[in-house]
Amino acid sequence: MPRREPNEAAAGTIAFGILYENRGKIISSAHLTEKLNVSRQAVNKIMNALRDDGLPVESVPQKGYILGDIDSCDSLSPALIEYFMKDCAPFHRFIFLHETESTQKIIKKYAQAGEDEGLAAAADLQTEGRGRRGRSWAACAGKNLTFSLLLRPNLKTGEVQLLNLAAGMAVKKTLCEATGLPFELKWPNDILRGGRKICGILSEAAGEPDKIYYAVTGIGLNINMESKDILAELAGMATSLMIETGRKWARWKLLIGILKNFAGIMDALSQKDGAAVLIDRYRRECDTIGRRVRIIQDEETICGKAVDVTREGALVAETDTGMRSFTAADVQHLRLAKEE
Ligand code: BTN
């Protein structure tokens, strides 16, 4: 099982919290044994586990432990994520895997075993990362955020698109807040910067037509990839936060930002008329609306002007053959008429 035993995981989160809330100070083993109600050996084991997860926990001989600078650390330690998410239900349980086939698969297993909504799983490397419409999602070990979330929304299976739109808005908001730069939200849920893709989102649902039993929303966000890491076939089409800003980013901070923003949007969606409110907000934030677009659906390619998004999240476009709506398609933003 990728997840730590609940007691061990909880002790790690509490221990991290004590060190973080007393940052700059040495915390004695005696204090930690008392607060965690465990032996000194157990404290030592917990501290080693935090260190193994990449946290800068230093031992000070004969004195105790002190937390180093976490701002520049690139750990995706469950203790760190769960501590900062502790008051942000439902996303306060987190699994980290160094390598897995796909975090979608991991979360689906937990969902089928009856796990509560909100569990998040991230991996440094996905060996079979999946994208929309049967495509693969390229890996770049340890540089990006690739994670999936377990959701149990009160929606019909046909409304799964709303989860995609919600996740896209949460990622766009997080990136704008973190960098102060503009990002584009392309229907249904790609995040672009200057027309190049920086984030992709995949939501899958299981249930009956009338009710989603569970949904898995997976997010792949390019963070610390350099130009040389972008696959040749994606050159000019993909980018990363590092390429755009010229600096490295702490992945854990962006993950927390996305989870918090997504929790807020999902809470709004669960309220009365939540779907209508979400769509209204999406219409304002989606950069596809009002643009000339090329729409690729199955074997068909259609050019037109994107004019609206329906209550179910479908794109409405004015085409040569009249107004048409598209529930699942690939869209390209066109800048100049000659690009069509
Ligand atoms: C797309 O734009 O095609 C969607 C890409 C979704 C990728 C993420 S990465 C985390 C999760 N695990 C996967 O295998 N896919 C999603």
Image (spheres, grey):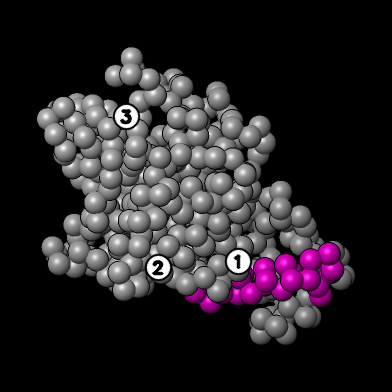
Q: Is residue 269 above or below residue 205?
A: below
Q: Which mark is residue 84?
A: 1
Q: Position of residue 24 (x, y in %)?
A: 83, 64
Which residue is at the front of the view, 28 or 233?
233
From the image, give the main secondary structure of the stretch colored magenta.
Answer: helix
**Image depth: mark 2 or mark 3 in front:** 3
Disc 2 marks a residue whose amino acid type is Ala
Disc 1 marks a residue whose amino acid type is Phe
Q: Position of residue 218 (x, y in %)?
A: 38, 51
SS at circle 2: helix
Query: Between disc 2 and disc 3, whose residue precedes?
Result: 2
Q: Residues within 10 Å of mark 2 (few under 14, many from 20)?
A: some
Which residue is at the front of the view, 285 or 140?
285
Q: CA distance from mark 1 to mark 3?
A: 42 Å
* Span shown in magenta: 6-28
SS at circle 1: helix
Q: Is residue 165 left or right of residue 157?
A: right
Q: Residues within 10 Å of mark 3 (few under 14, many from 20)?
A: many
SS at circle 3: strand
Q: Which mark is residue 268?
A: 2
Q: Residue 263, can we see it?
A: yes
